[in-house]
Image (cartoon, rainbow, N blue to C red):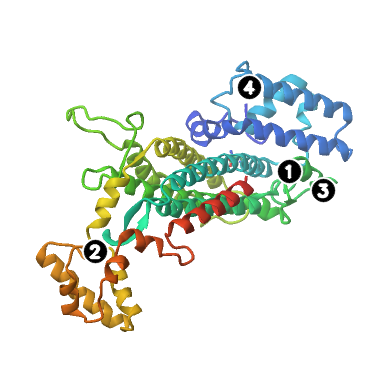
Amino acid sequence: MKLWTGRFSKEVDKVTNDFNKSIGTDSRMYKEDITGSMAHVRMLVKQGIVSPEDGDKILAGLKSVLSDIESGKLKIDPDAEDIHTFVEQELTKRTGDAGKRLHTARSRNDQVALDIRLTLRNESGKVDSLLSSLIETLTGIAEKNYDAIMPGYTHLQRAQPVTFGHYMMAYAEMFLRDRGRIKDAVKRMNSNPLGSCALAGTTYPIDRQYTSDLLGFDDYCHNSLDGVSDRDFIIELSSCLSAIMVHLSRFSEEIILWCSKEFSFVELDDAFSTGSSIMPQKKNPDIAELVRGKSGRVFGDNMTILTVMKGIPLAYNKDMQEDKDCIFDAFDTVKACLTAFDPMLQTMTVKRDNMRKAAAKGFINATDCADFLVSKGIPFRDAYKAVGVLVKTCIDKDTTLENLPLDEYKKVCGEFDEGVYDAINLENCVMKRTSAGGPAPENVKKEIERVRKINSSLN
Ligand code: ARG
């Protein structure tokens, strides 16, 4: 049965019904739908629009529908048009005329706008708390490896020395920003559309502040057309989720590289890796690869909502029913990725010795060597050229700056002395990078404390 019979002389065609219905997606909002209806009916009673007796019947009926769905006693009809229809019809079966009064001063347009906001507020909280745990994991790994020297890269070429702790904290910063972005988006989303009705408000004396307070909104939407038409919060949240996936995907890429024999900087725990059906020696970083791959879904979800919204006039259009599949998929994907990624990281073995060995090759102390000459009064550009010549000499002689004899240094520039070996010692190179935000172990320790404080203050 449709809510909108009366004007129609025929039952709706089966194909049309199947095409039109959204129950497969929106049934997951049953709780939010019922919560919204409860607030609405309380307001109707307070304003004298519905009698207290009918109000009590509706509230009790809604409560029983909710508990029956949760216990499994009431199955959601897969042929219902949507969750709003299903709940209202079930309520009416249980309460008769009282149930028929629930939809006074309301439309499914403001109802669905409300349900999505309530659902996404909740989903955002879940992603936020998964991010908080991930940041905690990263600070833990950073603390253990705050002095583990590794090569930092640009263009994937060894560049300058950093520590593994510093590296982990770079990702912690990204995920901290992700938390901030989600929280900002939720703040903007937290306005109540209920009371916008179909598009033009209502002549009933409703109290929108009251339902906003009951439902935990900071305010209500101040334009009824905008209240039912706005899906900016889906655009914003799906782009926040895309940013999270970009970070997770870059991190995954690094882990995949680091797991390879060529790097061998980390090893994933057996419980968080998979094997090959044919190659007995293989241990594959599937979680990281899947996370990297799933980023595509979330970016696609973001593009979906942008495209759905871009050409529709105010106010509600049925196109907007396509808003839920994409954002639910984006949230589910991000939650699944964070849930798998965090324990994979927690159980990962960090191979400090291999990183230190890799740092010894690749002339990552060449800048420090040039800086040594600068300390002797040579202009940086000249010092840079001199060290370039030294690096070429090392490559020709198959040696390192550390092992090159002093007379070779002196051939290139007379200002070199024994002190250069201290200056290019990798431990010293890292220790002296104390510029704010730099990788010096003492800096990293401070940053770990700072990030921990911010992270817990956001909880
Ligand atoms: N299932 C619809 C949706 O998700 C609910 C709103 C229906 N409103 C309407 N005027 N047909 O968008």
- If the picture is divided into quarters, which one holds ligand 1? top right
Q: Are marks 1 and 4 in contact (CB under 8 Å)?
A: no
Seen from the viewer's position, the closer of residues 193 and 339 is 339
- Note whether 430 is above or below 88 in the view shown: below
Which of discs 2 and 3 lies nearer the camera? The answer is 2
For marks 2 and 3, the one nearer the N-term is 3
- The residue that appears at 65% across and 31% down in the rendered structure is 31
Q: Quadrant of the N terminus?
A: top right
Seen from the viewer's position, the closer of residues 451 and 372 is 372
Residue 363, numbered label? 2
Identity, as a three-letter code, of the amino acid under mark 1: Gly
Residue 69, numbered label? 4
Identity, as a three-letter code, of the amino acid under mark 3: Thr
Residue 194 in picture, x, y percent from top left = 72, 45
Q: CA distance from mark 3 to mark 1?
A: 25 Å
For marks 2 and 4, the one nearer the N-term is 4
Q: Does residue 236 appear in this view?
A: no
Find disc 3 in the rendering and name its residue: 203
Disc 4: CA contacts within 10 A as few (<14), some (14-19) or many (>=20) = some
Q: Quadrant of the C terminus?
A: top right
For marks 4 and 3, the one nearer the N-term is 4
Find disc 1 in the rendering and name its residue: 216
Q: CA distance from mark 2 to mark 3?
A: 77 Å
